[in-house]
């Protein structure tokens, strides 16, 4: 199962522009297969996508199908942000509502 970064207060799941297996750009949830690597990358990754206060972001183990659902809801659109509530509900908001 992959690891993602989730904001402690808002529930936002960190996403960014990435390359798929076909070398095409897409906007989707950043995920790691290893918790240790997520911890190592966390500060620089959040800084690179424009977020301050990395201590507000926590590493979360999440099922692959939930990551895929988050990516579907993002619609490859960098103006969208996906949030995962404490009870597992996924919602989408515009980037203007960004932290």
Image (cartoon, rainbow, N blue to C red):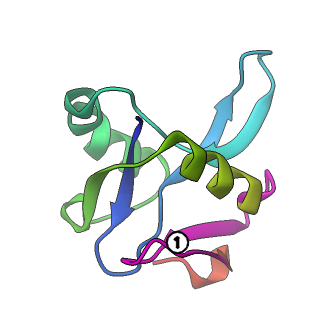
Circle count = 1
**Which region shows up in magenta?**
74-92
- At 41% from the left edge and 73% from the top edge, which residue is drawn? 11
- At 65% from the left edge and 81% from the top edge, which residue is drawn? 96
Q: Position of residue 57 (x, y in %)?
A: 28, 61
Foreground of the two, 57 or 99: 57
> Is 31 colored magenta in this rendering?
no
Q: Is residue 61 above or below residue 70?
A: above
Foreground of the two, 34 or 95: 34
Per the image, label 1 sits on a secondary structure element best described as: strand
Q: Is residue 80 left or right of residue 38?
A: right
> Is 78 colored magenta in this rendering?
yes
Question: What residue sits right under mark 1 in the picture?
Answer: 83
Q: Is residue 55 left or right of residue 4?
A: left
Residue 19 occupies which quadrant of the picture?
A: top right
- For the N terminus, which image quadrant? top left
Q: Is residue 74 above or below residue 26?
A: below
> Could one spot residue 35 in this view of the protein?
yes
Q: Is residue 78 left or right of residue 35?
A: right
Q: Position of residue 38 (x, y in %)?
A: 29, 35
Q: Is residue 95 above or below residue 23?
A: below
- At 64% from the left edge and 33% from the top edge, which residue is drawn? 18
Foreground of the two, 40 or 85: 85
- For the C terminus, which image quadrant? bottom left
Q: In this view, does 58 lie above or below 47?
A: below
């Amino acid at each position: 199962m992959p690891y993602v970064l989730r904001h402690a207060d808002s529930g936002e799941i960190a996403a960014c522009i990435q390359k798929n297996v076909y070398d095409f750009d897409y906007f989707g949830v950043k995920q790691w297969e290893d918790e240790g690597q997520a911890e190592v990358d966390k500060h620089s990754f959040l800084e690179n996508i424009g977020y301050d206060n990395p201590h507000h972001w926590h590493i979360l183990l999440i099922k692959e199908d939930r990551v895929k659902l988050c990516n579907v809801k993002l619609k490859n659109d960098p103006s969208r942000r996906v949030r995962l509530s404490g009870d597992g509900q996924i919602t989408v908001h515009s980037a203007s509502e960004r932290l």
